[in-house]
Image (spheres, rainbow, N blue to C red):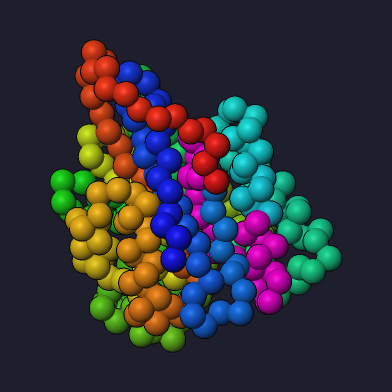
Amino acid sequence: MTETTTQTYRVSDELQLSWAGITDRGRRRENNQDAYLAAFPLFVVADGMGGHAGGEIASQSTVARLAEVVEAGEVSTDAIEEALRQAVEDIHAHPEATDEGTGTTLTGAFLGRDDDGAWQWIVLNIGDSRVYLERQNQLLQVTTDHSVVQELIASGKISPEEADGHPYSNVITRAVGASELVPPDYVTVGLQDGDRLIICSDGLTKELTDYGILHFLRENADPGAAVDAMVDAALENGGRDNVTMIVLRVALSSPDDDSSSTEDENAE
């Protein structure tokens, strides 16, 4: 298996980002309905649904519109939501799309600044793909799933332990393209040195527990090595779905730190 390359970008004198992304069809699916974008400053994963071709159409259309936002050089919540409106139109206009639930989840983050000028992640989410934060050797789920099971957990009708085997475990309540667009949920996260964001489709979380994800992060400091290790583990555990993920690592230093870095703004 080819090793995934880690991209590194010097954002400013005090901030450097490193990242790697990967997608795999898995062991049981005939095609890959996932797509991802890892292009500074926007990093997203989309998990398509809706028939043999529908999921691919939805996820790829959404990622393509978001790539245009990056190319235009103005990544913001407004620009993202306009891109998603255009993606919904693209999905509905596609000759191979169906009216039976063609759509995609979307989750990820982009780098911005808060009102005081400090760097922060703006995390976004529609559906049940997830963003995790690994900080100081602990893993936190930043996003909240838009799913029937999550609503049952929130209402106290089932426990989190009962969620995996629940008959509605794959039923999501929000998606891009499946109905009129609902804006993403947003969460802001300040940056700390050594932070890692994990952006993933549920093909990963179906096969690895949070502890399993944290284990492979502990074992692999390099983002490329981490994504390879986790996808390999997901496949070994069954690979029941497409598996897609991005790992981002934050390195903060003082402005007078003149350590060298490699810049690559053309990450795939």
Give the residue drawn at x 61%, y 43%: 66
Q: Position of residue 154 (x, y in %)?
A: 32, 67
Judging depth in this view, the residue of 5 and 107 nearest the camera is 5
- Image coords of residue 32 (percent x, y): 59, 69
- Above or below — where is 47 with respect to 251? below
Q: Position of residue 19 (x, y in %)?
A: 40, 44
* Rendered position, 32 above or below 73: below
Q: Compared to 184, does 130 lie above or below?
A: below
Residue 53: within the magenta? yes
- Asked whether residue 253 appears in the rendered view, the answer is yes
Image quadrant in which the N terminus is located: bottom left
Q: Residue at x 64, y 68 (%)?
A: 55
Left or right of residue 57, residue 161 in this image? left
Residue situated in front as seen by the camera: 24 or 261: 261
User: Which residues, given as a range, are shown in magenta?
Assistant: 38-60
Instruction: Identify which residue is drawn at 40% across, 26% down.
Output: 11
Would you say 133 lies left or right of 34 here? Answer: left
Query: Looking at the image, which residue sits at the far top?
Result: 256
| Image label count | 0
Quadrant of the rendered image containing residue 165: bottom left
User: Residue 95, position in %: x, y?
Assistant: 84, 65
Which residue is pictured at 50% across the width and 49% down the height? 44
Q: Is residue 79 shown to the viewer in this render?
A: no
Q: Nearer the viewer, residue 173 or 223?
A: 223
Taking the magenta stretch, the answer to whether it contains residue 222 is no
